[in-house]
């Protein structure tokens, strides 16, 4: 477990550059991902999962007759397939996708994008004159989240206090089922009660499903390690920088004795900024 405490000492000039960059990125067009990967609705979820895993992405836009009609995500894979005990080949993209798409214009502000994402609860498809031109996720938003002046906004206000954990010897299939049932994106992996890693939706896709690795192996063998954590009282804007620089979307939060008291996600930070 690596506690990121003195962020000014660890990331001095970089943090200042983050402030300056965030001032320039004000519109959806500045931060959207223009390369949109698509899939047809009758493709099975096994093939969809492999596509996401190979591309290191968490969603696919669904095209029917060349028209965007929905979106399927890594969370859909967990909730609609693995949590129900189905095989990936038994479920189609059509049966798991969300429709219609949540859309936004490229000229909209980042603040509008954050508010829309929270209100509609999903990734945003960017349309310009009825043409799909990009996609925005919570990770895209935090990479250029404008600096919030109100330093009273701390992670403690937005974190989830119940942290799901699993012993390192628990099978991945069981962990994935729990994640799907509880609609969570990660589980902290422990060894003798102490955190040693984190297993996420993205680990499931890129490390296992994309490579055809069976899910009957211990989660400790495929979790991400070390676990980066931040102390209670860290500002949300600093947390956004840490997530962006470490390429993670979740950070456990610890108290003064380095005991885990919660977890915060990229989506939580977007919620904080949206208010």
Image (cartoon, helix red, strand yellow):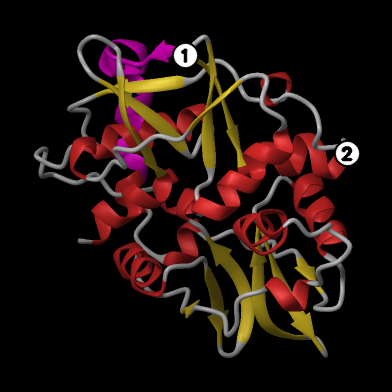
Query: The magenta stretch spans which residues?
Result: 1-21
Provide the secondary structure element on which disc 2 rests. Answer: helix
Res 163 quadrant in image: top left
Q: CA distance from mark 1 to mark 2?
A: 30 Å
Few, some or many residues within 10 Å of mark 1 (<14, 14–19, 20+): few
Task: Tell me the residue at 74%/56% (across/down).
Answer: 85
Q: Is 257 left, or right, of 164 in this rendering?
A: left
The earlier-in-sequence mark between 1 and 2 is 1
Task: Tell me the residue at 50%/78% (across/down).
Answer: 102
Q: Quadrant of the C terminus?
A: bottom left
Q: Position of residue 270 (x, y in %)?
A: 34, 54
Q: Is residue 130 above or below residue 268?
A: below
Number of numbered discs: 2
Q: Is residue 6 magenta?
A: yes
Provide the secondary structure element on which disc 1 rests. Answer: loop
Task: Tell me the residue at 41%/46% (across/down).
Answer: 266
Q: Is 200 left, or right, of 240 in this rendering?
A: right
Few, some or many residues within 10 Å of mark 2 (<14, 14–19, 20+): few
Task: Tell me the residue at 75%/78% (across/down).
Answer: 94
Of residues 33 and 169, the one drawn nearer to the viewer in this rendering: 169
Which numbered disc covers residue 247?
none
Q: Is residue 248 magenta?
A: no
Q: Position of residue 104 (x, y in %)?
A: 46, 78
């Amino acid at each position: 477990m690596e506690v990121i405490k003195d962020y000014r000492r660890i990331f001095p000039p970089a943090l200042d550059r983050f402030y300056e960059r965030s001032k320039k990125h004000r519109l959806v067009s500045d931060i959207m991902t223009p390369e949109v990967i698509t899939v047809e609705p009758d493709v099975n979820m096994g093939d969809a999962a492999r596509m996401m895993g190979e591309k290191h992405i968490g969603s696919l836009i669904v095209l029917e007759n060349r028209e965007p009609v929905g979106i399927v995500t890594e969370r859909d894979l967990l909730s609609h397939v693995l949590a129900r005990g189905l095989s990936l080949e038994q479920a189609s993209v059509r049966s798991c996708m969300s429709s219609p798409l949540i859309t936004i214009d490229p000229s909209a502000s980042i603040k509008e994008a954050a508010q829309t994402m929270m209100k509609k609860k999903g990734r945003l498809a960017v349309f310009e004159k009825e043409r799909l031109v990009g996609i925005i996720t919570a990770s895209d938003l935090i990479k250029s989240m404008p600096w919030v002046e109100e330093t009273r906004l701390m992670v403690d206000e937005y974190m989830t206090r119940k942290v799901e954990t699993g012993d390192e010897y628990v099978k991945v299939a069981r962990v994935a089922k729990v994640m799907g049932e509880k609609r969570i994106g990660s589980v902290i992996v422990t060894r003798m009660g102490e955190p040693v890693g984190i297993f996420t939706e993205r680990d499931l896709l890129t490390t296992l499903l994309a490579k055809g690795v069976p899910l009957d192996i211990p989660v400790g063998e495929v979790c991400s390690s070390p676990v980066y954590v931040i102390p209670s009282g860290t500002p949300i804007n600093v947390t956004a920088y840490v997530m962006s620089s470490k390429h993670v979307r979740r950070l456990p939060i610890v108290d003064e004795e380095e005991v885990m008291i919660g977890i915060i996600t990229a989506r939580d930070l977007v919620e904080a900024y949206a208010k």
